[in-house]
Amino acid sequence: MISIVHACKVVGLSRSIWYYQSKKDDSEVIDKLTELSESYPTRGFDEYYHKIRREGLIWNRKRVLRVYREMKLSLRRKHKKRLVKRVKQPLERPSKLNECWSMDFMSDALIDGRKVRVFNVIDDCNREALAINAGLSYPARAVIETLECLKEEIGVPKYVRCDNGPEFISKIFVNWCKKNFIEIKYTQPGKPMQNGYIERFNRFFREDILSAYYFNDTYQLQKISDNWREDYNFNHPHKSLGYKSPKEFMPRFDEEFKFFIKSDLNNNYLSNLEVS
C-alpha cells in the first residue's frame, strides 16, 4: 500500500482532482426526458430538446444530449398502442330492465386442447343471463351477431359495460353501438371489479360448468350452458335481490303477459266450473 500523496506524484495528478467529487445533479433533466419519452416514444433528441427549450428550461444542449445518451434513449424503442384514459364508472344497479348490460369473455379448453371462448351478457337490473355463447373464436363480428339476436328478442340497452378487450374497442363494435344509440361504459384497465356484476356471474359459471366438466366440442359446451342459463335465471337465489331468482325478481313483459293470460284462463275455467 502506498499513500495517496505518493500515488498522485507518481501519475502526476493533483490531489485536489483526486478528492474532487462532481456536484452535478441531472435528476431534473432525467425526469423531463423520461416524461417526453413516455409521451412521445417515437421522437428523437432534437424534438425533445426543442420542447424543453420552449418550456423555458435553459439547460445546455451538450448536457441534455449527454443525459439522453446515458439513458439510452437513442435506441429504437418498442411501444404499444395506448388506450384512451378511462374514467371510473360507478357500479350501480339500474331500476329498469334493458338500462345497462354487462358483457365479458371467459376462456377454457376442450379435451383435445383447443382453446374455447365464452361470451356472457347479463342485465344489471335483475342479473338475468341474456346470453352465454361459446366458440373456438369470438371476434367482434360474432359479438354483433349475438347482440343483434338479443335486439330482435328483447331490444337494446341504454348502456353496455365492458372491459378494453380488442372485441369491445374495435370499430365494428363501437359503430354498432353508435348506430343503436348505446353508450359504452369502459372499465379502467386492471380494475375488473368495476364490472362486478358479471365478474360474480362468471365465478358461478366457472364453478358450475367450466371447472366441473370436460367438453368434447363447442356444441356440447353450448348445450350444457343453455340448460345452466335457464336454471340460473329461474332458480338461482340472489342475496342482493332478496334471495329471489332473476326472473322472479323482475320478469320481462312477455313473461308477465304469459303469466296473466295463464292466470286469466285459470280463473275463467274455475268460474265455468262454479256456474256448471
Image (cartoon, rainbow, N blue to C red):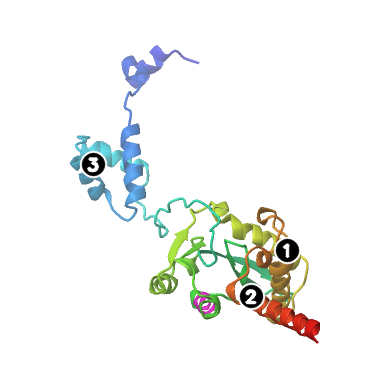
State the image coordinates of residue 233 (x, y, percent, origin top left).
68, 68
Residue at the spot of label 2: 255
Q: Which label sits in the foreground, 2 or 3? A: 2
Q: Earlier in the sequence, mark 2 or mark 3?
A: 3
Q: Residue at left 61%, top 62%? A: 126
Q: CA distance from mark 2 to mark 1?
A: 18 Å
Q: Is residue 24 above or below residue 202?
A: above
- Helix, strand or loop for the magenta stretch, by majority: helix
Hey, which quadrant is residue 181 in on the image? bottom left
Is disc 2 in contact with disc 3, using a CB cutoff of under 8 Å?
no
Q: Which label sits in the foreground, 2 or 1? A: 2
Q: Earlier in the sequence, mark 2 or mark 1?
A: 1
Q: SS for tag 2?
A: helix
Q: Residue at left 50%, top 51%? A: 90
**Does 258 appear in magenta?**
no
- Whether residue 203 is visible here, answered yes or no, is yes
**Does 144 appear in magenta?**
yes
Magenta range is 142-148
Query: Crowding near pointer 1: few (<14 within 10 Å), some, many (20+)?
Result: some
State the image coordinates of residue 120 (x, y, percent, origin top left).
60, 68
Residue at the spot of label 3: 52
Hey, which quadrant is residue 56 in on the image? top left
State the image coordinates of residue 51 (x, y, percent, origin top left).
22, 45
Q: Which label sits in the foreground, 1 or 3? A: 1
Residue at the spot of label 1: 236
Q: Is 41 or 266 nearer to us in this picture? A: 266
Q: CA distance from mark 2 to mark 3?
A: 66 Å
Q: CA distance from mark 1 to mark 3?
A: 61 Å
The amino acid type found where label 1 is placed reads His
Residue 19 badge: none
State the image coordinates of residue 82 (x, y, percent, origin top left).
40, 57
Query: Crowding near pointer 3: few (<14 within 10 Å), some, many (20+)?
Result: some
